Image: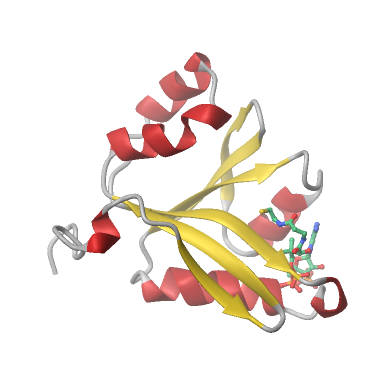
Amino acid sequence: MGSNPFAGTKESMYKLNSINKKFGRISYIYLKDFKEIIDVFKSYFTKRDIKKIEKENFNDVLSIHSLIIFDNYRKKGFGSKLLNEVIDKYKNKKCILIADKREDKTLPEFYKKNGFRKLFTCKSGQFMIRG
Ligand SMILES: CC(C)(COP(=O)(O)OP(=O)(O)OC[C@H]1O[C@@H](n2cnc3c(N)ncnc32)[C@H](O)[C@@H]1OP(=O)(O)O)[C@@H](O)C(=O)NCCC(=O)NCCS
């Protein structure tokens, strides 16, 4: 398999994909290069944040845009299950996201338990990566 298995397909555009389950949903985008990453994230970033991400030489990543588990289903493993379902679907590609501090200040703990680490703090929260 080449570095971009989705080249030339719809998946290589900024298409927001979603998986909906009775317990929650996840939305994600496949981003093929750095330019796309900046396009998608620029509203969350300051110029300084962009400089920080430039150093990372990103390409070919899965970007998680929202993960919501409905109230009654929380803390039962569903959030981790849904997140890993998407990561597995993309053959364990690098995965990026912003743990948005306006949503929940303890979110980074959830993502750390799922193998993510903080790359830097950006204006909206923690920019995190797995892989
Ligand atoms: C964050 C969220 C997706 C977690 O889903 P979940 O199904 O409750 O999580 P899991 O049951 O898979 O939890 C896995 C681990 O993370 C911990 N965890 C779960 N939610 C957490 C949170 N908000 N803060 C800190 N730790 C959390 C769990 O306690 C569990 O720890 P353990 O393995 O030591 O027992 C869910 O709480 C949610 O939908 N929150 C509101 C929306 C949101 O903020 N989404 C993320 C940003 S878009």
How many dots with numbers? 0
Residue at 16%, 58% in the rendered image: 7
Q: Nearer the viewer, residue 112 or 12?
A: 12
Vertical placement of residue 105 versus 10, above or below:
above
Residue 129, image x, y percentages: 50, 48
Vertical placement of residue 31 versus 84, above or below:
above
Residue 49, image x, y percentages: 51, 23
Say which quarter of the image contains residue 69.
bottom right
Please indicate whether residue 11 sits to the left or right of residue 101 in the image: left
Residue at 25%, 55% in the rendered image: 12
Residue at 62%, 70% in the rendered image: 25
Residue 27, image x, y percentages: 53, 62
Please indicate whether residue 82 sits to the left or right of residue 5 in the image: right
Residue 10, image x, y percentages: 25, 61
Vertical placement of residue 3 versus 88, above or below:
above
Q: Residue furthest bottom?
A: 22
Please indicate whether residue 66 sits to the left or right of residue 56 in the image: right
Say which quarter of the image contains residue 79.
bottom right
For ligand 1, the image quadrant comes to bottom right
Q: Residue furthest right?
A: 72
- Assign the C terminus to one quadrant of the image: bottom left
Residue at 69%, 42% in the rendered image: 100
Vertical placement of residue 51 versus 35, above or below:
above
Q: Nearer the viewer, residue 1 or 35?
A: 35
- Assign the N terminus to one quadrant of the image: bottom left
Please indicate whether residue 94 sits to the left or right of residue 28 in the image: left
